[in-house]
């Protein structure tokens, strides 16, 4: 039987529509290409600029990973989840727009401002993900989470197309803009889109599960956090899943963040890369939706196995990529599973967590994901710099998917018996 989406579900999903513009333009496509142009104009080798991009991503994710569990634990108190979400969202939007103010010959400043945008984006996502327990039931989590990713892919393409139009028209002389100026305008467009379409989330999504305020909020938050560590055996299933997630999501994040620089190192033009990555977003939309539907039939865990298998294959294939056609095939493979693996990981974890402590546990979810995202780009950067081959750097990521797959096998199945595997508060 079809059940209509509630206002809270739709508003929560719509944030994926809003912030996915950042993921596509800033993390994956335009900014990485712009950075490589700026760095190489300054005399930096292509492989070195790729390595520095990896190091910047590692540093940004390391900072938010350190903060996430503590902030998440504090945000479990009534009314604080909204405040933390709003702060990090605002930080991300403001500094995304500020990227346009960085002179086109200042690659170090560009990386610094990008680091601040990444902290804002990642910090807001800690609380956004934790809101999943507040907006829907356990039975609908896979569907709602996957739908969020699906509409995010479509939402991200609209400001991206506007930005691409500016870049193409500037390159063919139709607009009196340089490539750098067109990229800078695209950063402003991304910030406006992200800010405007977050309004439904800010207005309609409320914290339903929470802990009542008490004196010494910060002190008691640290006490609760230490209690969780001390009683880790009570949450064995949850932390076993996080360990598996730590490895396989590292590979996913690395491929997302390094895709454009990898393509550029293969000699693929910036305009061709933008087209390829746009098509990848369009392909990802129906596949993210499909993963949600198949999870209802075969279980979320089974579909996570499928996604990890796809990523393992594409990492091996990436080692042999030499042509634009090869990169097309690689990008489309990514599109088939990128949204599915992220959406089902989020909903699988949401079914495990104690709802009143969702922010604390999604803080752990974030720290495992973000510390993994430190390791992946760092591994790729080091291997690329040592070998002088970006292909070898991408191949190294396959190890992370294999380890994640093996660990996920050890996680007990919870999809069909969520209540019997609930965890004590």
Image: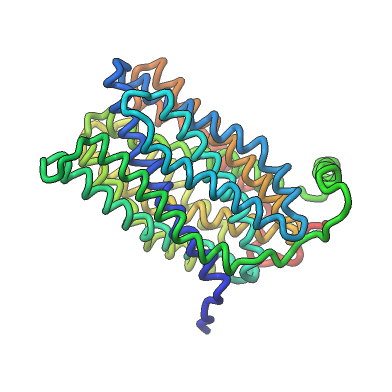
Quadrant into which the C terminus falls: bottom right
Q: Residue furthest bottom?
A: 1
Q: Is residue 397 visible?
A: yes
Q: Is residue 236 above or below residue 65?
A: below
| Residue 91, percent from left and from top | 54, 44
- Taking the view exactly as shown, the residue that stands out farthest to the right is 215
Residue 10 in the image: state x and y as whole percent.
Answer: 51, 70
Which residue is rendered at x = 47% and y = 51% of the image? 307
**Residue 232 visible from this viewpoint:** no
Q: Residue at x 52, y 36 (%)?
A: 116
Farthest residue toward the left? 173
Residue 28, image quadrant: top left
Between residues 317 and 196, which one lies in front from this camera angle? 196
User: Between 119 and 216, which is closer to the camera in this rendering?
Assistant: 216
Label tally = 0
Residue plotted at (71% across, 67% down): 208
Question: Picture coordinates of residue 422 (x, y %)?
Answer: 76, 61
- Residue drawn 42% across the image and 49% down it: 191
Horizontal relation, residue 182 to residue 412: left or right: left
Image position of 357 with respect to 2: above or below: above
Rendered position, 286 above or below 391: below
Q: Specify the color scheme.
A: rainbow
Q: Is residue 201 left or right of residue 337?
A: right
Q: Is residue 321 left or right of residue 114?
A: left
In the image, 51: left or right of 374?
Answer: left
Q: Where does residue 16 sit, x and y in percent of width and height?
A: 47, 58
């Amino acid at each position: 039987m079809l059940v209509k989406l509630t206002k809270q579900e739709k508003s929560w999903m719509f944030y994926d529509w809003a912030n996915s513009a950042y993921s596509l333009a800033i993390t994956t496509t335009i900014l990485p290409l712009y950075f490589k142009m700026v760095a190489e104009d300054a005399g930096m080798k292509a492989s070195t600029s790729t390595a520095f991009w990896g190091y910047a991503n590692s540093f940004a994710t390391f900072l938010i990973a350190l903060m996430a569990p503590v902030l998440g634990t504090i945000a479990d108190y009534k009314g604080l989840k909204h405040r933390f979400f709003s702060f990090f969202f605002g930080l991300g939007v403001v500094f995304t727009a500020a990227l346009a103010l960085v002179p086109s010959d200042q690659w170090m400043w560009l990386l610094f401002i990008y680091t601040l945008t990444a902290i804002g984006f990642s910090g807001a996502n800690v609380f956004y993900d934790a809101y999943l327990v507040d907006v829907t039931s356990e039975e609908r989590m896979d569907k709602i989470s996957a739908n969020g990713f699906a509409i995010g892919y479509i939402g991200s393409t609209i400001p991206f197309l506007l930005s691409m139009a500016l870049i193409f028209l500037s390159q063919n002389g139709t607009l009196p803009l340089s490539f750098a100026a067109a990229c800078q305008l695209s950063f402003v467009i991304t910030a406006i889109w992200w800010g405007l379409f977050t309004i439904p989330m800010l207005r309609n999504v409320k914290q339903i599960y929470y802990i009542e305020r008490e004196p010494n909020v910060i002190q008691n938050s640290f006490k609760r956090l230490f209690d969780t560590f001390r009683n880790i055996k009570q949450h064995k299933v949850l932390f076993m899943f996080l360990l598996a997630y730590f490895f396989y999501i590292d590979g996913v994040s690395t491929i997302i963040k390094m895709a454009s620089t990898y393509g550029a190192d293969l000699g693929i033009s910036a305009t061709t890369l933008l087209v390829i990555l746009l098509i990848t977003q369009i392909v990802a939309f129906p596949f993210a939706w499909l993963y949600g539907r198949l999870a209802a039939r075969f279980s979320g865990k089974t579909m996570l196995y499928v996604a990890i298998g796809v990523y393992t294959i594409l990492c091996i294939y990436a080692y042999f990529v030499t042509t634009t056609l090869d990169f097309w095939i690689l990008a489309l493979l990514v599109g088939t599973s990128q949204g599915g693996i992220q959406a089902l990981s989020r909903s699988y974890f949401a079914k495990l967590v104690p709802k009143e402590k969702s922010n604390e546990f999604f803080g752990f979810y974030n720290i495992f994901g973000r510390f993994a995202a430190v390791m992946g780009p760092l591994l790729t950067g080091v291997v690329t710099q040592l070998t002088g081959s970006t292909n070898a750097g991408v191949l190294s990521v396959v190890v992370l998917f294999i380890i994640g797959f093996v660990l996920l096998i050890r996680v007990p199945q919870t999809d069909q018996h969520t209540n019997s595997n609930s965890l004590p508060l």
